[in-house]
Image (cartoon, rainbow, N blue to C red):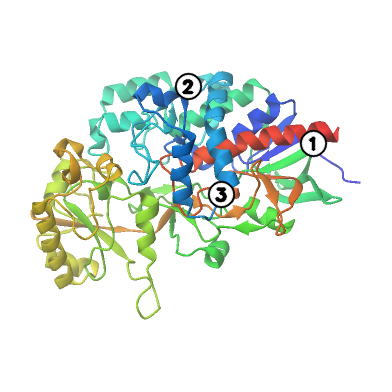
Amino acid sequence: MTNWNLETDVLIVGSGGGALTAAILAHDHGANTVVVERSSLVGGTTAVSGGALWTPMNTHMKDLGISDSREEALEYCLKITEGRAADTLVEAYIDTAHIMADYLEAKTPLVFSAMTMPDYHPQEKGAKTGGRCLESNLYDINELGEWKGKVRPNAIPFMNHQTTEEQYSTYKMMVNAANMPADLVMERMDKGLTGRGHALIAGLLKACLDRNITILLETRALDLISEDGRVIGVRTQKEGKDYLVKALGGVILGCGGFEWNEKLKNKYLQGVITHPHSPPFNEGDGIIMAAEVGADLINMHEAWWMPALEVSGDEYEGRPYSYVCVTERSCPHNIIVNRRGRRFVNESASYNEMMKAFFFVNENGTGYRNLPCWQICDSQYRESYTFLTICPGDPDPEWIIKDNTLEGLSKKIGVDADGLVETVKRFNGFVQDGKDQDFERGTYAYDQYMGDMDRGPGPAANLGSITKPPFYALQIYAGAIGTKGGARTDKDAQVLNVRGKAIAGLYAIGNTMAGVSGPGYYGPGGSIGPGMTFGYRAGIHAAGEAKKQR
């Protein structure tokens, strides 16, 4: 006989967007619900993200004058998954995501708006050049009362929460972070208004608090407890002691991937992740627990790849902070080169796709051909665009590597000088012709959206000559927002064993679940959208199971 410390109907492990959505839906379908979170803060990776949800056929697309259909969304998604995610899961996602978003708007404080950012592969059939991505409007964090300080913040002050992603684009902060009026930022800070992933989690957390859903922080799930082939609870650790939670209807694992677990990364990934962008608690706890009870693990070699930058001394949770590298590589007057001084990728492509080129193996079969790699730019770039943490007009900090010649810069960073000089000359020719003949940079709507569209339509948003000294270099590292391999599930997020049979009482969502997009990335919010959608489905299903077990 197990001596339970706490008994409930549905237990959710984790507190990101998917986990809190699952908690809300389980409660609203009649289940007593408990959330356990390993860290001292709520929100996981969702809270420090842009907070977008890729949501085909969403209600707010009409506000932008954009239409969508199931047929278009399905054609696009099946192309991106390359057959490496079950069609039934893809269909469940497309059919449910917009319903989930409408439900949360109706039943929680969240208010969504559609974004103008394109799908990540706008050249593919069924893609849209905007509208499928939803984000939360600004939210008053004061509504959380004593919980307002328990939503995970961004680590770096200038990465503020006082804008939405759409406002980030409207104010052209991707070009110059200082474009956002400082008085507006201060006004919003004074009022407690927050945006992006912070706002999304705050709204979901408020909905949980309004429902009196129990949330236990600093409570790490360690082992699943089974009886007669059914998962009935979890052994957690709280204040250094075992704390056993029984879950009559099921356990929903939504506690992230394994990007901070060196052993699992070395075992599974196709490439290295040296600079994770997530909070340092994603060590694969849920995936390990699922595997221990027979879960089929798939897609384990994939991640939500994101190139990374770093500034010496900047830390988060006691570890070096990894900045995402998006706009730095998309604006004109810069290229990315390997140690040979050669370009190897469309610098402005979506982060998940462009980073796969980092892992091409050398011809002799040892090491990666394109790591290490460097962003190279000139003073035209430096005078016009944000460069990591510094804006145009700011003095050059000590951590920037620069030189008056490309040859001198090459020597400082260990890159072949002849290769770099030749590459820059070739690239400048493409700029003059208005077409990147090597990698088609600036050809697609997504490239242009992330560049400087004030320079005109087409490739001009991304292409600019590298001619004006001094020249600058910044190393780019292999990063990831999270891993996307995990437990194989059915359309209700029930975990399946290696024979394809559901493990009773066990669910996986978010990055604990094998990614529904396979190797691809549908668009902005392509990880949070599925996480919340399958959280929605898991919550409903687990609540139904609780009723059956009573």
Disc 3 crowd, CA 10 A, few/some/many (<14, 14-19, 20+) = some
Q: Residue at left 14%, top 53%?
A: 378
| Residue tagged 2 | 111
| Residue tagged 3 | 281
Of the pair 64 and 421, the residue shown nearer to us: 64
475 sits left or right of 490 in the view: left
SS label for mark 3: loop
Image x and y of residue 44, in percent:
54, 41
Closer to the N terminus: mark 2 or mark 3?
Answer: 2
Q: Residue at left 29%, top 33%?
A: 169
Of the pair 274 and 548, the residue shown nearer to us: 548
Closer to the N terminus: mark 2 or mark 1?
Answer: 1
At label 3, which amino acid type do we have? Answer: Phe
Give the distance between the C-alpha atoms of the residues marked 3 and 1, in whole angstroms. 24 Å
SS label for mark 1: strand
Placement of 248 over or under 304, stated as above or below = above
Quadrant position of the C terminus in the picture: top right
Closer to the N terminus: mark 3 or mark 1?
Answer: 1
Image x and y of residue 156, in percent:
38, 40
Evaluate if marks 2 and 3 touch, with contact meaning CB atoms under 8 Å apart: no
Report the mark closest to the observer, 2 or 3: 2
Placement of 337 over or under 221, stated as above or below = below
Report the mark closest to the observer, 2 or 1: 2
Query: What is the residue that sits farthest to the bottom in this orientation?
Result: 364
At label 1, which amino acid type do we have? Answer: Leu
Q: Residue at left 13%, top 62%?
A: 426
Image x and y of residue 58, in percent:
47, 28
Give the distance between the C-alpha atoms of the residues marked 2 and 1, in whole angstroms. 34 Å
